[in-house]
Image (cartoon, rainbow, N blue to C red):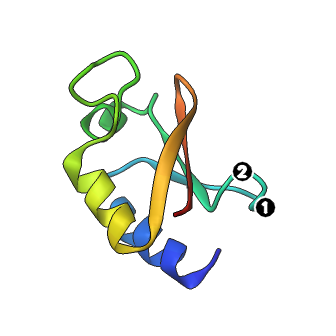
Amino acid sequence: MKRHARKAFTELKKAGCPVKEWHNDSRGHFWIDAEEPEGEDWLDYWKNDIFFGSDRLNSILKENGLYWEWANCAVGHVHDI
């Protein structure tokens, strides 16, 4: 994982975001598991107020040159801007 992605991953993990690592980078740097119980504080496909991600999630990613997008209703992939 590239340095800027690792920095965001670590910051999100310490904050309680359910981030997970890939075994390769074909689907982005890492992913966010929206099905974990703590995931609903960060993103939720079924809730309009957090469908686009929490302010904190988007801020941390943006500070590191990253963004996320839904892969399906349970997983958000993180990519370079």
Q: Is residue 44 left or right of residue 56?
A: right
- The residue shown at (52%, 41%) is 69
Pointer 2 with pointer 1, Cβ within 8 A: yes
Question: The residue under label 2 is which amino acid type?
Answer: Arg
Frontmost of labels 2 and 1 is: 2
Q: Which residue is mark 1?
A: 24
Left or right for 28, reference 43: right
Calculate the distance from the C-alpha at mark 2 to the C-alpha at mark 1. 8 Å
Which x, y percent locates residue 6?
52, 75
Q: Decide: is 23 above or below 34.
A: below
Dot 1 amino acid type: Asn
Q: Is residue 63 above or below residue 56?
A: below
- Residue 33 in the image, given as x and y percentages of width and height: 49, 39
Q: Is residue 24 visible?
A: yes
The secondary structure type at the circle numbered 2 is loop
Q: Position of residue 22 (x, y in %)?
A: 69, 56
Q: Residue furthest front?
A: 81
Residue at horizontal 32%, vertical 40%?
Answer: 53
- Helix, strand or loop at disc 1? loop
What residue sits 52% from the left and 63% below the top? 81
- In the picture, the disc for residue 27 is 2
Count residues near mark 1 (Cα–Cα under 10 Å), then give few for <14, some for 14-19, many for 20+: few
